[in-house]
Amino acid sequence: MLSLGYEEDQPTRDEVDAMPGEVALEFGANWCGICRAARPLLDQALDARPHIRRIKVADGKGYPLGRSFRVKLWPTLVLLRDGVEVGRVVRPVDPADLEDALGRAGFARS
């Protein structure tokens, strides 16, 4: 099975809070079928916004970053601007819903 790219080596919450600009933290698990199904949708939306820093974070027991953002379901996309959460999408299945959330957060297409 191909990895979805969720990294176990991840930044701390303090490092995330200090990140400048627009950041998309994508929480999931490499073995997660729902994450695999959502991957093309997330790739399409975020590839259209190359200025956004995308960080794919492995989540689960023992991973404090996901707990600090109260992530409960995968995939969860947390949208940050200068370290402050400005939006969130949980288990996206509809491209329009994802685009709407990105738009509400002010994450414009390039």
Image: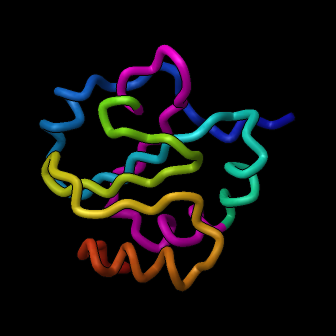
- Which one is nearer the viewer's eye here, 46 or 58? 58
Q: Is residue 92 left or right of residue 26?
A: right
Q: Is residue 57 above or below residue 102?
A: above
The residue positioned 51% from the left and 58% from the top of the image is: 90
Q: Is residue 25 magenta?
A: no
Q: Is residue 60 magenta?
A: yes
Residue 31 position in % (x across, y down): 75, 34
Residue 72 position in % (x across, y down): 50, 41
Q: Is residue 28 above or below residue 90?
A: above
- Picture quarter with the C terminus: bottom left
- Picture quarter with the N terminus: top right
Q: In the rendered image, which quarter is residue 60 located in?
A: top right
The residue positioned 25% from the left and 54% from the top of the image is: 80
Q: Is residue 107 left or right of residue 9?
A: left
The residue positioned 51% from the left and 71% from the top of the image is: 45
The type of colouring in the image is rainbow
Q: Is residue 18 above or below residue 102?
A: above
Which region of the structure is painted magenta?
A: 41-66
Residue 13 position in % (x across, y down): 24, 28
Residue 29 position in % (x across, y down): 64, 35
